[in-house]
Amino acid sequence: MRSVLAVMLLSAAFAAGAQSQPRPLPPGTTPLDRPPPMAPTDVAHEQGPAPEVTMRMDGDNEIAEYRMKGKLYMMRVKPKNGPAYTLMDHKGDGSFTKQDHTLTPNTSVPQWVLLEF
């Protein structure tokens, strides 16, 4: 039984070794020494137009208003005392919602009771 298993493993190893030879190139092709140059890209075109940012003071709060094509879509508020926060208009209807962290706005932290004393 062991000899049959050994013969099967050796034949599989030889078959794998035979397949690891380099493939011949298709007719009419030549190998590349280095990759072809990339076409230059316009970084500003890929990122889209830059928003218009207006800074203003409202009492002790510093407010940065972000507009795209004249429409206000985001405000960043920096109070004199306290952490800064962001107000976003997600629907475009003029109602702003507060976001404490801009990277993951829809993340909810699970709060389960594990132990009680």
Image (spheres, rainbow, N blue to C red):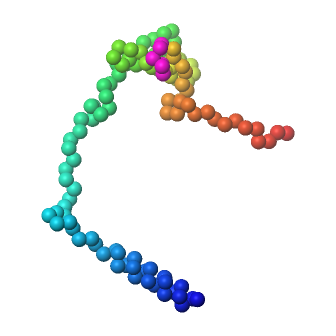
Q: Quadrant of residue 30?
A: bottom left
Q: How many marks?
A: 0
User: Where the C terminus falls, by quadrant?
Assistant: top right
The residue drawn where x is 56% and y is 19% is 81
Left or right relative to 94: residue 30? left
Q: Position of residue 54 (x, y in %)?
A: 38, 15
Q: Position of residue 40 (x, y in %)?
A: 21, 41
The residue drawn where x is 57% and y is 88% is 2
Q: Is 41 placed above or below 29 here? A: above
**Farthest residue in the bottom direction?**
3
User: Where the N terminus falls, by quadrant?
Assistant: bottom right
Q: Is 111 placed above or below 9 here? A: above
| Magenta region includes residue 92 | yes
Q: Is 19 placed above or below 96 here? A: below
Left or right relative to 20: residue 81? right
| Magenta region includes residue 25 | no
The residue drawn where x is 38% and y is 14% is 71
**Farthest residue in the right direction?**
117
Please tell me which residue lies in front, 23 or 54.
23
**Farthest residue in the top direction?**
59
For the question of whether residue 64 can be seen, the reply is: no
Q: Position of residue 7 (x, y in %)?
A: 49, 87
Q: Main secondary structure of the magenta part?
A: loop
Q: Is 60 placed above or below 49 here? A: above
Q: Which residues are magenta?
A: 89-94
For the question of whether residue 8 can be seen, the reply is: yes
Q: Position of residue 92 (x, y in %)?
A: 45, 17
